[in-house]
Image: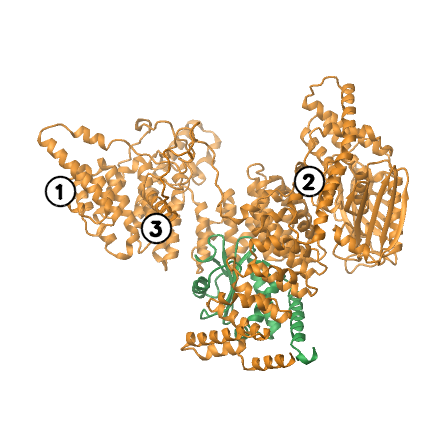
Amino acid sequence: MIKAILIFNNHGKPRLIRFYQYFAEDMQQQIIRETFHLVSKRDDNVCNFLEGGSLIGGSDYKLIYRHYATLYFVFCVDSSESELGILDLIQVFVETLDKCFENVCELDLIFHMDKVHYILQEVVMGGMVLETNMNEIIAQVEVQNRLEKSESLPFILH
Amino acid sequence: MALKIVKGSIDRMFDKNLQDLVRGIRNHKEDEAKYISTCIDEIKQELKQDNIAVKANAVCKLTYLQMLGYDVSWAAFNIVEVMSSSKFTYKRIGYLAASQCFHESTDVIMLTTNQIRKDLSSPNQYDTGVALTGLSCFVTPDLARDLANDIMTLMSHTKPYIRKKAVLIMYKVFLKYPESLRPAFPRLKEKLEDPDPGVQSAAVNVICELARRNPKNYLSLAPLFFKLMTSSTNNWVLIKIIKLFGALTPLEPRLGKKLIEPLTNLIHSTSAMSLLYECVNTVIAVLISLSSGMPNHSASIQLCVQKLRILIEDSDQNLKYLGLLAMSKILKTHPKSVQSHKDLILQCLDDKDESIRLRALDLLYGMVSKKNLMEIVKKLMLHVDKAEGTTYRDELLTKIIDICSQSNYQYITNFEWYISILVELTRLEGTRHGHLIASQMLDVAIRVKAIRVFAVAQMATLLDNAHMLTGNTQRNGICEVLYAAAWICGEFSEHLENPMETLEAMLRPKSQEGNTDSTTAQEASQLMIDRLPLFVQSANLEVQERASCILQLVKYIQKLQQKDVEVSEEVCALFAGELNPVAPKAQKKVPIPDGLDLDAWINEPPSEKVDEKELARRREARKQEQANNPFYIKASPSSQKVYQETPGVEHIPVVQIDLSVPLKVPGLPMSDQYVKLEEERRQKERAEKKKKDKKKRKEKRSGRGKKHDSGPESEEDITPAHMVDIVTEEMPENALPSDDDERDPADPHKALDIDLDKPLADSEKLPVRSHRAAEVLKSPAEDEEGENVSSLEPKKKSSKEKREKKKDKDKDRKKSKEEKKKKKHKHEEKEEADLLCGQADEPAFQSEETNEVVTPPTSTSADVSDLDFWLSNAPVPSNTQEAATVAAAEAAPAPGAISVTTPDSEPEEPKDTEMEETKSSKHKKKKQKREKEDKEKKKKKKHHHHHHHHGDKGGEESVQNGTVEEEEPLPPMSNYCLLAENSYIKVAYDIQGNLQDGSQVVVSVIFENKCDSFLKSMEFNVLDSLNSKLQRPEGSGPHDSLTIPFQLPPGVSNEARFVFTVQSIIMPQKLKGTLTFIVKNEESSTHEKLDFKLHFTCTSYLITTPCYSDAFAKLLESGDLKSSSIRLEGVNMPFHHLLARICFHHHFSVVERIDSCASMYSRSIQGHHVCLLVKISSQTVSVDAKCDEPTLLGNVLDEIKQTFSQC
């Protein structure tokens, strides 16, 4: 199970947070801070796994993260997930973002947090991996975007 | 109205949207909080408007603010409003917001039930999808209960997109509403074989997640997962399954044996590191589970270790990390194979990556031996000095202590060295582990008697230098050590060299902590003088109490002494008695004596109740106290020695310490010198030994001595410097040996520990709202009644017959087990004979059956024995395509897995139309033969159960429809029919449709070597028709033959699979083909050829697909289906046998069964629906059928007719 997915930038500013277990808002912020603290002090050439922080999870949990340019993508997962598998999944997610936003950068995530959520929802659902095939993910996202577009046509046409 | 909408959208133009909000926040870096609060005010205004677009926009902004840490739960009701918008755009916004901020105690959630239900059944699949996604994040027990049935229906949705979401969310539903697990499980299991890989993956995901927490309930799924593992190419699915097997193997070592081979193959073949890694992990788990039984897996171990070494040496830090992680698992059971890589691991200790260093540390734990302990610890101490950051240093510290104290200090040869290591560790800045060092000191001093003198001396020095330790406030943790030091000095004060000085040191009041004080005062009491009054005024209550207590005592003694009364003995008696450590859980293990009711009140309870908080506080305080109490040893390494009844001091051989080692070390000790000393000591010993050896050799002059001294010293050669007797923990009398670790009662998975094999009871149905479904609920109950009545009679009758038979056969009524078995065995023979003759001798057959089913096996036991059968190494070439519910319990051997059967020299069985039976009956014969030789009674039993399993199928089918009934078991069946045969080889085949691809069928062919020679270079070729083609590897021509990837030793059979593509499936077809092979024996080798005709029946294009009665009814109503019917005369078999045969041979599943009438369903690989209505009345069976393809239907019916004409 995936317990949480956090995306924040090099300064610890959250760009997307997705908890699959309830935490109150202040706790969520604390977790983001702690995670950022743990992850940011690591060099880029060390391994991408981290024994879980004290706030989230505990001994059974691991932080698996990737650092792309200005953004950290952090997944907090338990032992039923394959470490390398999750690393691949992050890669799939980022590549999907890249396709959907055409050369994704931090600004895309900042201004379109909702869209990033919708894409993530096609990858992970309720803490479990839903789809790993990028084409399938993109296809579903696009159909829904079209649906949205058709709804936003001028009301006179309806 | 239109005007309003126009107005609304104009309003919207002036509203901020999400982008504006974000931009605004970015432009107000200085007064962000203020800006946001004005934005929230705006949002509140927007939410008050009627326009849903405005509301949705506001909710979207709130979602963003939630991410920044603002509580937006006040808008929960507005979120629900937006969720219920009819537009997908807004609905999605609403559900997203809900999934971000709703949780179990959000009260508006209960308002959403109907809205969610509406969305789930929306005709737009994306409405459904959004609702499922949202629900997965905020499902509550109430929602789970109310919606479980709706979600379960969605698992069979036509769109895979919805199916996979519905399957995944079921896991959340199970967690919140455990009662739903059993009713939903059959359908979930079906999804493991869903044609869509995404749905399949989701189902694997959910079941793996369930099984991980309660593995034993899912053991019966092992064969199904095994099949998936050997057939799936999706790495995600494979990883999950392999991980699951890792969790299952500890429960069933035989499973492990089965797994080793396919896993090793995967390790060799896969290029995906993730998969490789998981395979290695599971192989390790298997080896661990096997380690007790089968030591002969060194090849697998070597393979794992070797692959892991490659990972560790990789420049990718991730692989390195994982490699070390997996290595530590091997270490537990096979330390030898890891120890040879010590160099690599020590190297990792210097890695710049902390995670990797920590992993390497873990490994070191298991790699120490008596020989290298000092060396490793020395290295670690160096790291302690170098380490930056307290976390890593603390980790090092705990590791050092763990390493040294493991298995009751097994590897420590010199305890003086260890004490000095501990003392050195106290010098660490700001460690959090003072209590750990303290408890180690106490533990060693108490348990190792020989070391006490030394320990006391060290502790006295430590106390003397206490100011160094406590001077710095940062070192607070280390105060615990002083407490231990004081305790040791007090307890073993007889060893103190200079008691006065020590006492002086202890009583220096300046910086000591509360608890340090209290013990100090207590222990010092024996030598007490004048400082105490100071402590009497101490702020710490306990210190006060003890101080005044002892002060009084001392004053009293002084008084007595002044009166010249001899009291020293009495005073000694006050402190006499040795305290031994108490084992963990000791108290728990004392059984409650008879007649003692711990729940009964001793006195009537006081009227006022102590409130919970107070209780919790007290509990906390007690725990604290226990933690500080040296006699209350919490989890310490399990003791290997058994505690003797009375550990009188005399019984413990205390060996004098070799005084050639200077005991007193000036100042604080240095552990390093011990390393040197130890080295010298060992060298000396070695030299002595050599001398001895030489002497011996001189005396003996035999050649075998060489091995002895030239090799490196082994573990046993190292004699400890101190012969220590380690005092083990005390256990109370009558202690129970059990050692159960309870699970955390708060664990939500505990509720999911549910037996899934038990048939469903009516009461377990998921709550359904609709009217119609309630009726459905009723009918099975009636059904059951009818069934019971009808099945009661033949049983009675047969039991009578049985009794008669029994009389005939063996007059002795008291049957021994063996005899019973024999009887069973006879029955098998008979049954077989019946089948082969083609006339079912019904009554006799039944009576035989009931004979064994004196206590009818529950389906659980049948399932278990199925698993047993699958796990036992006997080949199972049949039954892969049984009715779906049963299919799970069976699995075909992996392609390429060679199943060895004993050579069968018995005369050939009749090879007529009944050929399909030969395979299984042949098995039986072989078995029986072996049994006759009276050896494998157990196997026979298993085998026998296996038949039961067939028999239970009828029952299970009906379980699906809500009725639980017990019916007579079915005769065994097999779908494999003879393809061709000559004196060398026998070939049988079975055709199955490919679930994944509508134009493919898989032909499983079993080759059995019948001769005494070796069969090799087998090649399989088929003359393709326009419609059907054998799939050949790329690059080969259309007429090339396929090489079969195995050879057959005499008497061995093996299975190969061939994929055919077919275009039209409405007609049966025959393909001509040849099998060529070389027969090789010692003298000669000949080239042989065997022609055959592969018959693709229309049945083989059908796939067992379960169908629920509502869907079935809809299908029939749709009117798209053409109908046709046949009549079968003279069918002389029970109705459920008939149904089972149709299910088994023709890949149907029972939709519903009422008395002697049943509806059945199947689907072709190209999606044709085939529906049957089967009725029986006095040996005449009428089958009314409907299908959207009349030709296909006609052919299927012909084939069914054919099947029954053979009976």
Tell me the colour chain A is drawn in.
green
Residue identifier under label 3: B433
Q: Assign a secondary structure to mark 2.
A: helix
Question: Which quarter of the rendered picture does the N terminus of chain B lie within?
Answer: bottom right
The answer to which of B463 and B615 lies nearer the viewer is B615
Rounded to the nearest angstrom, the CA distance separating label 1 from label 2 is 81 Å
Report if residue B1023 is visible in the image.
no
What is the quadrant of residue B860 in the picture? top right
Q: Which chain is orange?
A: B
Which is more N-terminal, label 2 or label 3?
3
Q: Where is residue B220 shown, x and y percent of the image?
A: 65, 42
Would you say B130 lies left or right of B332 here?
A: right
- Indicate the amino acid at tag 1: Asp
Please provide percent x and percent y for residue B377: 37, 48
Reading the image, the residue beneath label 2 is B870
Crowding at label 3, few (<14), some or many (≥20) Cα neighbours within 10 Å?
A: some
> What residue is rendered at 57% in x and 75% in y?
B54
Q: Report which residue position mark 1 lands on.
A: B530
